Image: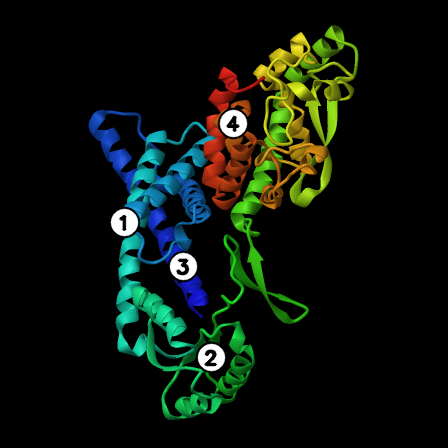
Amino acid sequence: MLKKRRELESHVQEVIDLFLLMGCMYAAHTVRRYIGAELSLRPSMIFRENILLAFAAAAIGHFSLKAQGFYSRPVGGSPGRTFWDAARGMGICVLVVLACLFVANIQDVNRATLFMFGVFGAGAVWVSALVWQHLVVVSASLRHNRRVAVLVGSPAENHESIAQIQRHPEWAIEVLGQINLNVQTVEDLGQLLREQPVDLVIFTAGKSYLREVESAILACEVEGVEAWLVADFIRTSISQTSLDELMGKPMLVFRSAPEVSWPLLFKGVFDRVMSGALIVLLLPVGLVIALLIKLTSPGPVFFCQERCALRGRVFMMYKFRSMVSNAEQLQEELVIFNEMDGPVFKIAKDPRITWLGRFLRRTSLDELPQLLNVFQGAMSLVGPRPLPVYEVKKFTDPWQRRRLSMKPGITCLWQIAGRNKVGFEEWMRLDLVYIDNWSLWLDLRILLKTVPVVLLGRGAH
């Protein structure tokens, strides 16, 4: 019920913010026309000629805010954090609109209007969020909006639940009483439900009382009262819990990687579109590199190797060959010179690397063919780097395999943290930090930070 109500409130807030963003575009356009008239600047188009742009900008702003998690924030967040989320979402919106105008070669849209729209929009949705948050709390405090609850469990378990309820007045839950299954029976619960107006029963009892809880839930069913079961009798460290359905049966799902969502879907579409565009754009560069490889050393142009992808699926990863053609056969002779801890094999001055290969590695140009892997869907632009199958089999700690719970990428936190200068354990930890904190904004930050790392060749050998 709380989740559904929060979703409903978020949808209402989203609709209100859509109208606010349209108003902000109109305000930005009006201010720009006024400033242009006062300062003799180039006049901007009248608003009705830009109405389609206003609708598009408002829609992009809405999806940008939603992708940043602006509408899934818990009630009670700090105003500063709320403002930062709003500013970040509108900043991305303006960048996307400008990029679309550039690609479409549209010249008659005033850029100053878009920047003012971003500023006005961030301020408007921020104020809207604060007002909405206040209204939610005030509404929850009204007597007729509060829901009466009975807690079923031990005093210690109930005490924890009561503390949580008191910390969240927006839940609008009022605790009427408690039932201790150690000293009371299901009949006592049924009698309480018949004598008092109870909206819901929250079961906090642990797994040792599951049989009694089942009977108590049936008692609630007879009385037509909602029953909520606190399902923390299976304790996990990092997994997020959600409810799903399979074969008509409710399923409690424990998930330690990002679940299917609009941001994750956008990430997949962005990967395909961007990799396809980069393949076409960089095709001449690739052809020159291929020709140089053929002219400078015998062997194939591409180095193909089986790597581990999502959930351990095996795929063939492509790179421009930077070593001699029999490099994998020579590796056994060089194992004693390995400079990386863990199962990964790396040498700073690897004798197998050709002179052209050193240049390709230092500039990361050897990674360009992986755009084909991204376009095929086996990889992403951003994600944990895919390791060879034989290295994954050498993992000594089970927690290291959790990096396989997300699609591998061309760049990642390890790439921008120093690559080969980072130890294996820290590398694995950075991958898990990325998975646990994934967002579109994090992907964008990693992509932007990858550019100077590649240009300066930091940590590459």
Answer yes or no: is residue 267 visible: yes
Q: What amino acid is at disc 2?
A: Glu
Q: Residue at x 32, y 68 (%)?
A: 163
Real-space Cα distance between discs 2 and 1?
35 Å
Q: What amino acid is at disc 1?
A: Pro
Q: Label 3's element?
A: helix
Left/right placement of residue 127 relative to residue 213 reads: left
Real-space Cα distance between discs 4 and 2?
53 Å
Q: What amino acid is at disc 4?
A: Val
Residue beneath label 4, please? 422
Q: Residue at x 68, y 33 (%)?
A: 391
Answer yes or no: is residue 102 visible: no
Question: Between residues 280 and 298, which one lies in front from this camera angle?
Answer: 298
Disc on the earlier residue, 2 or 3: 3
Which is in the foreground here, disc 4 or disc 2?
Answer: 4
Residue beneath label 2, please? 226
Real-space Cα distance between discs 1 and 4?
37 Å
On the image, which quarter does residue 197 sit in? bottom left
Q: Label 1's element?
A: helix
Residue 461 coordinates in the image, percent (x, y): 58, 17
